[in-house]
């Protein structure tokens, strides 16, 4: 077995969990809001869905900042098998 030596002086990047972000990705006819929510780093987010009143309360309680539209990254620039989100799962067939 090969032993891997990692540097011992690696300092993790700071993560400010007080910074919270929301990007609305859709609104359903049944009154639900689809959105991305991120803590600390807008690039790392989870997809969520809440009713409009719950979404507004969520945003107020978390003191969120709006995120801009997602960057258009070409699939060839990302790992193609992972270049999707949950919204895609309802419209697309995966391997």
Image (cartoon, rainbow, N blue to C red):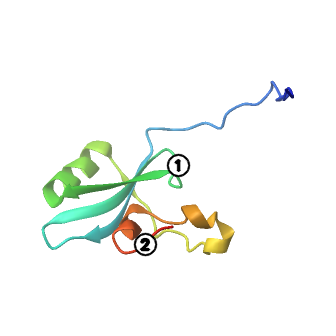
Question: Which numbered marker is on residue 49?
Answer: none
Rounded to the nearest angstrom, the CA distance separating label 2 from label 1 is 30 Å
Q: Locate residue 91, reporting x and y percent.
A: 36, 75
Task: Give above or below for 89 relative to 8.
Answer: below
- The quadrant in which the N terminus is found is top right
Q: Earlier in the sequence, mark 2 or mark 1?
A: 1
Q: Nearer the viewer, residue 62 or 51?
A: 51
Q: Describe the element under mark 2 as helix, strand or loop.
A: loop
Question: Which numbered marker is on residue 93?
Answer: 2
Q: Nearer the viewer, residue 62 or 5?
A: 5
Task: Give above or below for 7 relative to 46.
Answer: above
Q: Nearer the viewer, residue 88 or 48?
A: 88
In the image, what residue occupies the spot 85% across and 26% down?
3
CB-based contact (under 8 Å), mark 2 and mark 1: no
In the image, what residue occupies the spot 28% across and 51% down?
59
Tag 1 residue:
41
Q: Locate residue 73, reporting x and y percent.
A: 60, 72
Q: Locate residue 89, reporting x and y percent.
A: 38, 66
């Amino acid at each position: 077995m090969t032993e891997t030596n990692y540097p011992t002086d690696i300092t993790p990047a700071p993560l400010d969990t007080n910074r919270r972000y929301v990007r609305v990705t859709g609104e359903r006819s049944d009154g639900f809001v689809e959105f991305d929510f991120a803590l600390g780093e807008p690039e790392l987010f989870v997809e969520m869905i809440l009713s409009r009143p719950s979404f507004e309360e969520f945003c107020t309680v978390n003191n969120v900042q709006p995120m801009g539209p997602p960057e258009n990254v070409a699939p060839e620039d990302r790992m193609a098998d992972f270049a999707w989100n949950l919204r895609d799962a309802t419209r697309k067939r995966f391997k």
